[in-house]
Amino acid sequence: MTILTQEIPTQAVGRRKALDAYGRHIHYLRVSLTDKCNLRCVYCMPEQMVFRPNEELLTDDEFVIVLRAADMLGFDKYRLTGGEPTVRPNLAGIVREIAQLPGTREITMTTNGLKLAKLAQPLRDAGLRRVNVSLDSLDEAKFHRMTRWGHVNDVLAGIAAAEAAGMTPIKINCVVIRGFNENDLIELACLTYERDWQVRFLEVMPFADVAEFQQATMVTTAEMIAHIEATLGTLTEVNDGKLDGEARVYRLAGARGEIGFISPVSAPFCANCNRVRLTADGTLRLCLLKDGELDLKTPVRRGATSDDLADLMQHAIWRKPWGHDLANGVIPLNRIMSEIGG
Ligand code: SAM
Ligand code: SF4
């Protein structure tokens, strides 16, 4: 893929539409509200993880200034993530702020589900449309081994509350880790016979200090599909193979729900990328798997307006990299997944 031109065209600035140099329209912001978490998943962070001091994270008011800038640039879709977004105080207030932005079309959240039983209804009332809940195994012992601290029943209670609050269709995220849960795919896939959930299996991605473990335990989508089909029969493509976000989606014969595969390592979906990320400490990260970032916290703390930030963001988005370089052995080094947001 060649860059269209090196410089951002001035009319693109005037139009306040965030395009990158490859012609991709960037209108989806993943917002990491905190780097902190109430779990310590083995594939995400070390057990002795050291988090950033709260003063380094954007305050609610600072988030609002940046989110208004995103709105000015035509962003219309937001996903709240973390760390674990539900440990951020005043989460419903932040959702309400995003819902009130003039251009907002959709607000979703990725969560480990532990606190959803209490939070689902207030979040729905505030404007949260849907949730993706991470669930790596239905087996309590395996789930606990993977998350180090978690219990399956808490997650299931959270999912039930989200469904009761109308945050459907529920999407389940399962990161497949060799030696931990690669045989649990079948039980998780079978959930789709009874429920209209989308159960998505993710290839694990490598980040910084955790990369060695992540690369050693990675299971490819091809292997996952072969395993499921050998046990449960043919998976039929849904939507003529078109991506649903980043997932390729299939259905088992007779199932109500769908099975998705997210394959950032074996089949990158960079050509369809429409997103950038805002980290909890106020940087705009242009690609999940590349280290390039724009510091927004410093200008905010020096008094920049949303208008000023929109300019900075628009110029940075123009320079969004085409894609990642995992195939050439280049991995992100400056942050791990929980410090970026999935
Ligand atoms: N704490 C929330 C959760 O676990 O859902 C939100 C943040 S978490 C970083 C977002 C998603 O990324 C989760 O589905 C998690 O399983 C997934 N994830 C974490 N580390 C990953 C990695 N190295 N590769 C692929 N997915 C990962
Ligand atoms: Fe926490 Fe989510 Fe990372 Fe697990 S995957 S440690 S729940 S941020």
Image (cartoon, grey):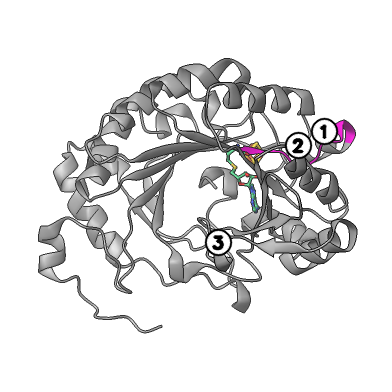
State yes or no: Cβ of the residue under disc 2 lies below 8 Å from any atom of ligand 2: yes
The image position of residue 256, as x and y in percent, is 69, 44
Magenta stretch bounds: 133-141
> Which one is nearer the viewer's eye here, 274 or 227?
227
Please give the name of the residue rendered at 45% of the width and 60% of the height, measured from the top-left corner: 287
> Which one is nearer the viewer's eye here, 312 or 302?
312
Please give the name of the residue rendered at 39% of the width and 22% of the height, measured from the top-left corner: 126
Q: Amino acid at mark 3?
A: Asn
**Front tag of 1 and 3:** 3
Mark-to-mark CA distance, 1 and 3? 35 Å
Element under disc 2? helix
The numbered mark at residue 144 is 1
State yes or no: Cβ of the residue under disc 3 lies below 8 Å from any atom of ligand 1: no
**Residue 105 is covered by the magenta coloring:** no
View quadrant of ligand 2: top right
Please give the name of the residue rendered at 21% of the width and 57% of the height, measured from the top-left corner: 17
Q: Please identify the quadrant where the N terminus is shown.
A: bottom left
Q: Amino acid at mark 1?
A: His
Please give the name of the residue rendered at 33% of the width and 53% of the height, measured from the top-left corner: 27
Q: Earlier in the sequence, mark 2 or mark 3?
A: 2
Vertical placement of residue 141 versus 335, above or below: above
The numbered mark at residue 239 is 3
The image position of residue 205, as x and y in percent, is 65, 59
Tell whether label 1 touches label 2 (CB within 8 Å): yes
For label 2, the residue is 147
The image position of residue 228, as x and y in percent, is 82, 58
Disc 1 crowd, CA 10 A, few/some/many (<14, 14-19, 20+): some
